[in-house]
Image: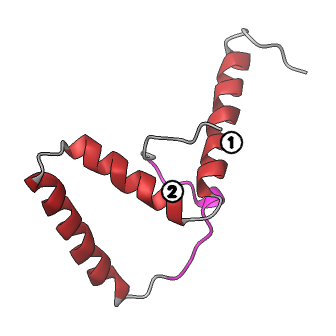
Amino acid sequence: MNLPTKHPTTSTPAHHPAQPVDIVSVPKMQKLLAQAAQLASDAGLAPEAFAHVAWQAYLGTVPGVAERLAEAQLDAAIEQLRSSGRLPRA
């Protein structure tokens, strides 16, 4: 199965259940992300590569999100093919 490798440009609330975020955890997340970004920068990692690695790490920790995104991408590709007349509608 091909999993999505690009981080989304917009949020998809229908595919991501709303979960309350502990206000205390936000600064901790920011600190950890800043440390990871500094580590990546010190290693000479391009910003795009860092974003890719961070997104892959997120996908690996949220059960089902990668599959839901892959399904949404497939649905969009099928719709694009249908809209362009290259794939008939059933």
Q: Which residues are magenta?
A: 10-20
Number of marks:
2
Identify whether 37 is placed above or below 68: below
The colour scheme used to paint the residues is secondary structure
Label ID, residue 30: none
Q: Three-letter amino acid code at disc 2?
A: Leu
Query: Residue 67 vs residue 82: left or right?
Result: left
Q: Is residue 38 above or below residue 18?
A: above
Picture residue at 71% right of the left edge, 25% below the top: 78
Q: Could you tell whether 47 is left or right of 89 in the image?
A: left
Label 2: few (<14), some or many (≥20) within 10 Å?
some
Is 63 left or right of 33, judged from the image as shown?
A: right
Task: Give how far apart the Cα atoms at labels 2 and 1 are.
Answer: 14 Å
- Secondary structure under badge 1? helix
Looking at the image, is mark 2 or mark 1 earlier in the sequence?
A: 2
Q: Which residue is mark 2?
A: 59
The quarter in which the N terminus is drawn is top right
Indicate whether residue 5 is drawn in magenta. Answer: no
**Figure quadrant of the C terminus:** top right
Mark 1 = which residue?
71
